[in-house]
Amino acid sequence: MRQTSFMKIYKKRWHSKILALSFCMLIILGFILAGLYNYYDHSTNPMIVKNLDDYKMALNNHSYIQVSSNDLYDLNISTTETTSKFGIKLNERITSHLMAIKLDAFILPIDLPNKIYFELSEGKSNSYIFTGHLRELPDEDLALIKTSISENEFLGTNSQLKPYYQYLHYETPLQSALICFTCAILCLLFISFLYFFVMRKNNIALKSLKNFSLGNLDEALIQIDKELNLPNTYINGPIYITENYIVVNTQQITLALPLKELVWAYKKTVKQKAGGIITVAKSNMLVLNFSDKKTYTINIAKGNNLIDDVICHISKNCSKTFVGYSEKLNNLYKKDYNKFISQWNMKKETSAIQND
């Protein structure tokens, strides 16, 4: 049997989503392998920095480094993070502390998280190993460190030492690989969205069409094709309304379902707010509810007037369908679906009597 045009479109969309899934899976695999490689490389082969030459080489190569020292100095400088709202400070917490070690005639500052800093302060070990990446010191921090070095008596004759223009940002091998694993998780979330909210919805819509056509899916598809080619077919963007069917063809969803099973159609506007107060964007969606309790939300870019026109057409040509959003209908649909359907059936019967 010749494949209908609707199924060609449906399968084309489906294949493109399968390709997107496969591509994302390859990206996830790549991120995971990169993370594992970074973890293994940083765990077993960090660049050991003992003097100025090692430091310069590490800086030029952007290497993951390891520094060991028995001489550890507390610069008494901490980094804080401030939480504020509307310009009013709500909270301030210490996120890290600066300590330092000596490399030749210079001091290398090390930014340590609270947990490591307190462990070192308690003197649990006489020998320390630090790993991480070299980062540029902001000018204000450099000036602060110079002041701290000159004022700290514990440095003794080293009080004239100067800091490097970089500092060591402490990272464990696992922390340094986390960015790759985080990217892999984000891709996995995207795949989950693509499958559960897009591909699965398309599959559900096709099964609904089969159920509504009492299992005669091929016959229903042939009828849809014939009606789509009729001159009285309503076409507005990705929405097609024939004598008996409503057809939707967007990147997110491709469906064809009987108009006689459309129980409720309305426009939904979602506001995106900055800080939960100022509306920065709006998106309009067409919501279609069918008698098998399946709901399809159709996103249409810049589709405000388009959605209004589609709903207006449904209102004029599908008198049995509830049109437009109301809290009363919404509460009834959510809390007592059987009663909602009962009212829809009454509306359908009334419409049939009037047409007769």
Image (cartoon, rainbow, N blue to C red):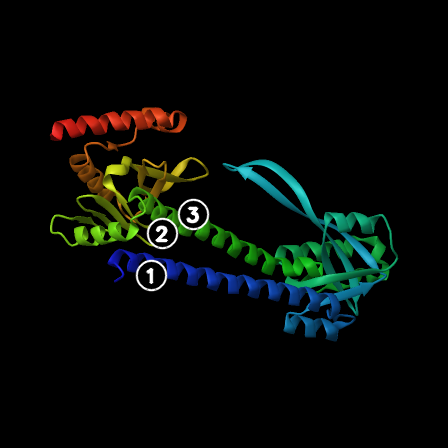
Q: CA distance from mark 1 to mark 3?
A: 18 Å
Please tell me which of labels 1 and 2 falls first in the chain.
1
Tell whether 196 sits left or right of 299. right
Q: Position of residue 167 (x, y in %)?
A: 69, 61
Q: Which mark is residue 252?
A: 2
Q: CA distance from mark 1 to mark 2?
A: 12 Å
Q: CA distance from mark 3 to mark 2?
A: 9 Å
Q: Position of residue 252 (x, y in %)?
A: 36, 51
**Residue designated by label 3:** 197
Q: Nearer the viewer, residue 201 or 276?
A: 201
SS class, disc 1: helix
Q: Position of residue 311 (x, y in %)?
A: 22, 38
State the residue at coordinates (74%, 74%): 54
**Residue designated by label 1:** 12
> Which quadrant does the N terminus fall into?
bottom left
Q: Amino acid at mark 3?
A: Phe
Could you tell me if residue 255 is visible in this image? yes
Characterize the local packing of mark 3: few (<14), some (14-19) or many (20 or more) Cα atoms within 10 angstroms: few
